[in-house]
Amino acid sequence: MQASAFPACAWPPSRSLAPIPAMRPVDLLFNRYGGYHRHPVNKAIHWVCVPLIVWSLMGLLWAAAPIAAYAAVAAALGFYLWLSVPIALGMAAVLGAMLYALTWLGERTLIVSAVVFVAAWAAQFVGHAIERSRPSFLEDVRSFLVGPAWLLGFVYRRLGIAV
């Protein structure tokens, strides 16, 4: 007997009118970002370099004008609030600590931030070469903001905090 080309389906069909739950934007973006970061070496590189890139980018903005750094943080927090309130609160704490750390550099802020920025991006590209995948931001520019939140999401899961 030949197997049917059609999958078995339940009969009679369900009478439930309950909607199929849609994935939240935070889950969709984290899943997409995670798809580009599966190799353990690439993940390890991202754990070090993503925070360094965020910190150094804020440092570059701070060196130009502190208000530019504050404006970038405010815009990022707006995005994180759209994603998830717990993510926004956690990122506010992380970004606040990063801004505070920048104040210690004084007049060296620009040069230190530039060196860290270039080195961290170079390492990121090495990680993606190992992964054999393109960086996710080439397909979705939001990945620049999703990366730090994705890392925080791992921390939250370890601590049992809902994203």
Image: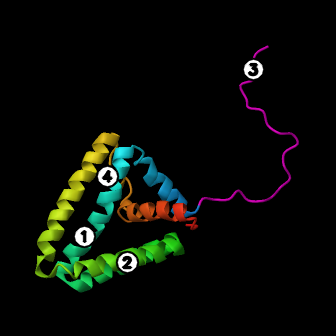
Say what amino acid the circle numbered 1 marks.
Leu
Looking at marks 2 and 3 on the same chain, the residue that comes earlier in the sequence is marked by 3
Q: Nearer the viewer, mark 4 or mark 1?
A: 4
Residue 95 position in % (x across, y down): 35, 76
Helix, strand or loop status at disc 4: helix
Residue 92 position in % (x across, y down): 41, 78
Q: Which mark is residue 3?
A: 3
Marks 4/2 in contact by CB < 8 Å: the verdict is no
Residue 55 seen in render: yes
Q: Which residue is mark 2?
A: 75
Marks 2/3 in contact by CB < 8 Å: the verdict is no
Determine the residue located farthest toward the right in the rendered image.
12
Marks 1/2 in contact by CB < 8 Å: the verdict is no
Q: Which residue is mark 4?
A: 45
Say what amino acid the circle numbered 4 marks.
Ile
Looking at marks 4 and 2 on the same chain, the residue that comes earlier in the sequence is marked by 4
Relative side of 70 to 162, left or right: left
Looking at marks 1 and 2 on the same chain, the residue that comes earlier in the sequence is marked by 1
Residue at horizontal 26 percent and vertical 78 percent from the top = 101
Relative side of 80 to 102, left or right: right
Instruction: Please determine whether, in this image, residue 87 is positioned above or below residue 33.
Output: below
Q: CA distance from mark 2 to mark 3?
A: 56 Å
Count of numbered marks: 4
Q: CA distance from mark 4 to mark 2?
A: 26 Å
Q: CA distance from mark 1 to mark 2?
A: 14 Å
Binning the other alpha carbons within 10 Å of mark 1 as few (below 14), some (14 to 19) or many (20 upward) gives some
Q: Quadrant of residue 73?
A: bottom left
Say what amino acid the circle numbered 3 marks.
Ala
Q: CA distance from mark 3 to mark 1?
A: 59 Å
Helix, strand or loop status at disc 2: helix
Q: Magenta stretch: give its range.
A: 1-23
